[in-house]
Amino acid sequence: MDKKYLKQFKDFLDEDTTKSKLTKVVLCAFAVSTLPVVAFGAAALGNGIQIVKMFNKGKKYNNKQISDTITNLKNGRYIEYVSEKNGKIKIRITNKGKSKLHTFMIDMVKINKPNKWDRKWRMVMFDLPIRFSKARNSLRFKLKQLGFIQFQKSVWIYPYPCMEEILFVADYYKVGKYVEILEISSLNNDSKLRKRFNL
């Protein structure tokens, strides 16, 4: 699993997992865990359950639910059991599982709001070629979801630091080189914007 995603997976698992779908919790737990599954058959499944439960802090899911989810992921070829030379078995996320995790990643993106506004505006601008029409729509939807307000046709505005999150979103949609992020100290007639953002 690409190391650049591991922090997001860990942050997600540190949150209230009771709000999350179990499939997402299980895959993320296996992605960040370095613990091997040390037995075959049912015992291996049992150890897989224990790995998931380490991150299942909300304790919403019982053993059967976790077991069924692991089995479904294995049957769906999102994970596989790999036997090592020392006799241990590790649960490995397949390429199909990694693709699923990457899809989860975009849903996990959020912007943490500071306690106090620094009185600066962040503008996200993009001009995507026609072939990226699907990515354009997805980017717009994600910006709305994150709380941005459309300032002009392809210009979106937000009051809090967000460069890292927006760069991640742009890279996810493979349009990073077409996206610009500006930080503006002042903006004429921003009273309506401040009101919409409750500033």
Image (cartoon, helix red, strand yellow):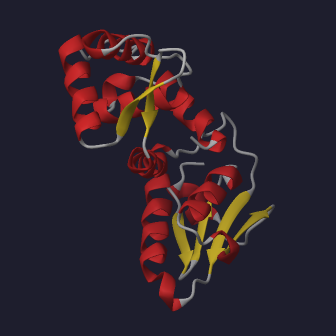
Q: Position of residue 111 (x, y in %)?
A: 58, 45
Among the 4 quarters of the image, the one containing residue 80 = top left
Between 8 and 193, the one lying in front of the other is: 8
Among the 4 quarters of the image, the one containing residue 56 = top left
**Figure check: 132 above or below 75:** below
The residue depicted at 59 percent of the width and 64 percent of the height is 170
Q: Position of residue 128 (x, y in %)?
A: 58, 83
**Horizontal arrangement in the rendering, residue 187 relative to residue 17 (left or right):** right
Tell me, yes or no, if residue 21 can be seen here.
Answer: no
**Horizontal arrangement in the rendering, residue 52 relative to residue 72 (left or right):** right
Tell me, yes or no, if residue 148 can be seen here.
Answer: yes
Q: Most extreme residue toward the bottom, as rendered?
A: 130
The residue depicted at 31 percent of the width and 11 percent of the height is 46
Q: Most extreme residue toward the right, as rendered?
A: 185
Q: Position of residue 84 (x, y in %)?
A: 51, 23
Between 71 and 64, the one lying in front of the other is: 71
The residue depicted at 39 percent of the width and 50 percent of the height is 96
